Each structure stands twice: as C-alpha cells, then as structure tokens.
Image: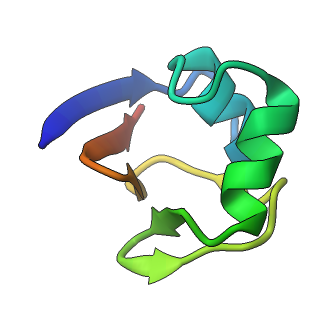
Amino acid sequence: MAQHDFRLEGEYIELNILLKLLALAPSGGAAKAMVAAGEVMVDGEVETRKTRKIRVGQVVTVGADEIRVVG
C-alpha cells in the first residue's frame, strides 16, 4: 500500500479535488466518477459524496493508496 501525507493549508479540501491534486485521478471528472462508483473510502467507510469536506486527521483510501491529511 502506498502512503501519502497531504498537508492541508485551509480548513478543508473537497474529496474530488484531493484525488485530482495527488494524481490519483487524471481529472476532476474522473475523481467524481471514482467517488460515485464507491471506489473511495474515508476513515474506513465507503464515501459517495463527491465534494465531501476532508479535514486534518482523516484518512482517504483509494485502491492501494492511503492518504493521511495532516495540518
């Protein structure tokens, strides 16, 4: 499993934008499609809200990639 740390500079980042910024999705549309298809987990639970607000301390999992959001 590949682990990534993402340093959050604001209060939150939307899930689809996070996936695009880390190149886990080739585009914003692809990121939204991945979330809608149930391919993304937040804190161990499947997330289907494309623009869910991700905050410091949360863990996003996509396939073999794990993203830890740090402040």
> Picture quarter containing residue 23?
top right
Position of residue 40 measured from the top left corner of the image (x, y, whole percent): 53, 61
Q: Quadrant of the N terminus?
A: top left
50 in relation to 30, above or below? below
Q: Which residue appears farthest toward the left when viewing the image?
A: 1
- When the figure is inspected, residue 66 is found, relative to residue 38, above or below; the finding is above
Residue 10 visible in the displayed image: no
Relative height, residue 47 to residue 61 (above, below): below
Q: Position of residue 3 (x, y in %)?
A: 19, 34
Q: Horizontal placement of 8 versus 62: left or right?
A: right
Q: Quadrant of residue 4?
A: top left
Viewer-side residue, 17 vs 34: 34
Residue at screen point 69% across, 40% down: 11
Which residue is at the front of the view, 4 or 53?
4
Q: Looking at the image, which residue is at 84% across and 54% down?
A: 51
Task: Tell me which corner region of the image, top left, top right, bottom left or bottom right, holds residue 58.
Answer: bottom left
Q: Quadrant of the C terminus?
A: top left
| Residue 14, image x, y percentages | 76, 43
Residue at position x 77%, y 36% from top?
Answer: 30
Residue 6: x and y in percent read 41, 26
34 left or right of 30? Answer: left
* Rendered residue at 29%/41% (across/down): 65
Q: Residue 46 vs residue 47: left or right? A: left
